[in-house]
Amino acid sequence: MTRRARLVCVVAILLTGALGLISSTQTWFHVTLATGGDVLAVPGAEAIPVLAPLCLAVLALGAALTIVNLVLRYILGALTVLCGAVLLWLIVPVAADAPVSAVARTVTTATGIAGVESVSEMIAAVGETPWPWATAVCAAVLLLAGILVLATAHRWRRAGRRFAADAPHTAAASDGPLDAVESWDDLSRGDDPTG
């Protein structure tokens, strides 16, 4: 059960981070301009500029959880909860209301007109794709995964021993010459078998 909880947490965090990163490149809104009827595609990274950096941070958190000790698991679990909560707080209002501020950057780039009021006068209609809500679901799963990390981290098998510089040597010292396997084992522990 402990191994399964750890696997579920890490996989959920990595998947939600990857899906959020993919979502940042996908079209969230279609904006129809009042003049000319041009339709502009607004990707997630334009609607929420911090979406891609936060998702990259989530991927790093998920990868780090596989090798850290107990204290760092709790810290990374808390950071995962924070990332999930922040993403939900940013995404849900955008998905629910499709505010002008979410599409303003794209409209300004296409027309050269800035300012929320001026941009809103340029917009005839805003159509929403499923991506904002799919990303909100990912953020909710991320939040739950972070809570699961905090609830189960103390039962996870100890990880990262091979990365510790002061890890105890498990192999008995040999009186005779080392063979190739023993030399590789020494190298894995950080010892130089030739010295």
Image (cartoon, grey):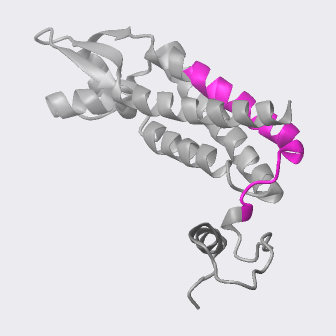
Residue at (64% x, 74% y) in the render? 186
Query: Is residue 188 on the magenta stretch?
Result: no
Residue at the extreme bottom? 195
Residue 147 colored in magenta in the image: yes
What residue sits 15% from the left and 8% below the top? 37
Residue 153, x across and y down, in percent: 83, 44
Q: Which residue lies furthest to the left in this view?
A: 36
Is residue 195 positioned above or below 79 on the image?
Answer: below
Task: Determine whether, in the image, residue 15 is placed left or right of residue 25.
Answer: right
User: Which residue is pictured at 69% across the width and 47% down the height?
Assistant: 79
**Residue 8 image-quadrant placement:** top right
Q: Compare residues 42 and 93 and report the one nearer the observer.
A: 42
Tell me if residue 55 comes above or below residue 61 in the rendering.
Answer: above
Q: In this view, does 182 lie above or below 12?
A: below
Count of numbered circles in the view: 0
Q: Which of 58 and 70 is in front in this view?
A: 70
Given residues 30 and 3, the one toward you in this image is 3
Prevalent SS, magenta region = helix
Q: What span is in magenta?
A: 136-161
